Image (tube, rainbow, N blue to C red):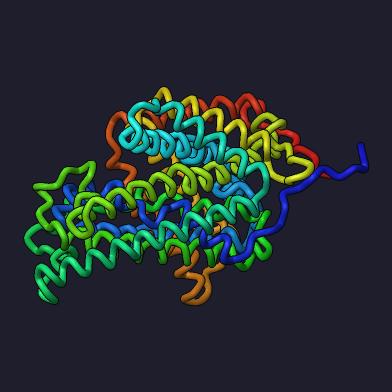
């Protein structure tokens, strides 16, 4: 065996970097692009949907924090379930979360390309996808510090644009209705709220927060992973929830009649009412930057590290575990994710890609919550005291119950796609482990 050490991932990220990465991944202005749809499904109570969303996902975030403290390694759900249960279940959990991480960049590229074509019709969508993909691959391969710097830059632009919108929105409301224009109707309509409504809201909201978990993929590049990863996940989730609720509240007050909204442009129409064409165009351009560059940059970084972690354990080809000798990033897996994103973004519909992502994320989150319960409450018998009962029993089982409710409400096509993907993973696992009797030999890193 050679005594020359292979390069490892570069340790460079602070707690602030991790929080901003999570905020970029979730996109602080994400509700702008789906505001009309959420408003119609919630009967004009989009802010309430995001309140429900935070309440839904907080339990899963707590499970991530629990695992991140115990296992500060790259791989996210794959690594955590692997350690908490066994490598075979861990592989299947990782295979399912890959539906989220592999297809998320393609979905984001496809959405951004559609917006760009609206602004510049003579440039085809595939060109925009290729430009964004190549840019993001270059930034990600050059080093995690570059990714962090790009995240901070575009996060700052997104936050400034959001503050500008909120300022125009408040000014517009004060001029048209005074203080009386601010009311709690967007949060509570007693004649509308019922179990069916709550179910719909939970389904929408839970899917709106996908991305907070991406912070866990950077554990091996964080300066203090045991301390910072879990804290950053919770902080990013709560902060982005406040941003989501605030922008939806103002936009709903500007145009409260959800029956007259155009679902595709509802938020930008509210911006036009509050600040005219310049505000509308500015928000559209910032959304393109936030989603097409920052969000996909974060998504590609997370996806490449999931692939890296699984390849390091030889569940995927070992070539994807290669680290760039200079930049110390998983460069082959980054290029592979980029190429896949380009191919899928050009060939598949936005709706189809969304279904792939939703099934994978929700299913793997359920497995993660159950793994926390299994490891800490059952296996290690950490049951004494209210703190252990809450963190090892109540929180993971509540997270499982909420996500299971979302899961059983997926449509038939989503279930078919999801179980087909799972079946492929089962076959790959069987081949790699001789029908689950052995484990692949892990890639040596020294």
Q: Residue placed farthest to the left in the image?
A: 191
List x then y, in percent, for residue 160: 40, 62
- In the rendered image, the vertical position of residue 271 relative to residue 429, given as above or below: below
List x then y, in percent, for residue 60: 44, 57
- In the rendered image, the vertical position of residue 99 relative to residue 81, given as above or below: above
The C terminus lies in which quarter of the figure? top right
Tell which of 36 and 304 is nearer to you.
Answer: 36
The N terminus lies in which quarter of the figure? top right
Residue drawn 20% across the image and 59% down it: 274
Residue drawn 33% across the image and 37% down it: 119
Residue drawn 78% across the image and 44% down it: 326
Image-quadrant location for residue 432: top right
Horizontal relation, residue 335 to residue 133: left or right: right
Horizontal relation, residue 298 to residue 399: left or right: right
The mark tally for this picture is: 0
Tell which of 294 and 191 is nearer to you.
Answer: 294
List x then y, in percent, for residue 131: 51, 33
Horizontal relation, residue 357 to residue 269: left or right: right
- In the rendered image, the vertical position of residue 97 relative to residue 17, given as above or below: above
- Can you see residue 84? no
Residue drawn 56% across the image and 28% down it: 339
List x then y, in percent, for residue 334: 62, 37
Image-quadrant location for residue 238: bottom left
- Can you see residue 140? yes
């Amino acid at each position: 065996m050679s005594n020359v050490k292979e390069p490892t991932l570069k340790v460079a990220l602070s707690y602030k970097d991790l929080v901003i990465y999570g905020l970029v991944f979730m996109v602080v202005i994400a509700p702008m692009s789906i505001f009309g749809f959420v408003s119609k499904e919630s009967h004009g109570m989009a802010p309430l949907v995001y309140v429900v969303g935070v309440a839904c996902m907080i339990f899963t975030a707590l499970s991530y924090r629990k695992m991140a403290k115990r296992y500060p390694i790259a791989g996210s759900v794959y690594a955590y379930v692997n350690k908490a249960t066994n490598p075979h279940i861990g592989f299947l959990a990782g295979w399912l979360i890959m539906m989220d991480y592999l297809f998320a960049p393609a979905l984001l590229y496809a959405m951004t390309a559609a917006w760009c074509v609206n602004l510049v019709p003579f440039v085809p969508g595939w060109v925009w996808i290729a430009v964004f993909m190549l840019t993001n691959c270059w930034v990600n391969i050059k080093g995690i510090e570059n990714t962090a710097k790009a995240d901070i830059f575009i996060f700052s632009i997104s936050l400034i644009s959001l503050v500008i919108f909120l300022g125009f929105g408040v000014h517009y409301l004060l001029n048209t209705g005074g203080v009386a224009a601010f009311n709690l109707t967007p949060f509570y309509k007693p004649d509308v709220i019922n179990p069916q409504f709550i179910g719909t809201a939970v389904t929408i909201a839970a899917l709106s927060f996908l991305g907070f978990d991406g912070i866990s993929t950077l554990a091996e590049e964080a300066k203090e992973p045991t301390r910072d990863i879990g804290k950053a996940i919770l902080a990013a989730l709560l902060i982005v929830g406040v941003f989501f609720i605030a922008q939806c509240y103002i936009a709903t007050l500007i145009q409260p009649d959800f029956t007259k909204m155009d679902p595709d442009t509802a938020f930008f129409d509210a911006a036009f009412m509050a600040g005219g064409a310049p505000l509308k165009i500015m928000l559209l351009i910032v959304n393109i930057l936030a989603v097409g560059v920052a969000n996909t940059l974060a998504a590609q970084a997370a996806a490449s590290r999931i692939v890296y972690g699984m390849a390091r354990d030889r569940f995927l080809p070992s070539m994807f575990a290669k680290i760039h000798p200079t930049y110390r990033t998983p460069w082959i897996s980054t290029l592979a994710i980029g190429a896949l994103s380009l191919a899928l973004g050009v060939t598949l519909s936005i709706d189809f890609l969304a279904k792939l992502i939703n099934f994978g994320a929700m299913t793997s989150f359920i497995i993660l919550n159950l793994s926390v319960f299994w490891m800490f409450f059952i296996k290690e018998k950490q049951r004494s005291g209210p703190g252990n009962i809450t963190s090892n029993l109540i929180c993971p089982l509540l997270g499982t119950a909420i996500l299971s409710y979302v899961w059983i409400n997926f449509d038939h096509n989503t279930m078919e796609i999801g179980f087909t993907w799972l079946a492929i993973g089962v076959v790959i696992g069987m081949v790699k482990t001789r029908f689950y009797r052995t484990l692949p030999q892990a890639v040596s890193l020294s």
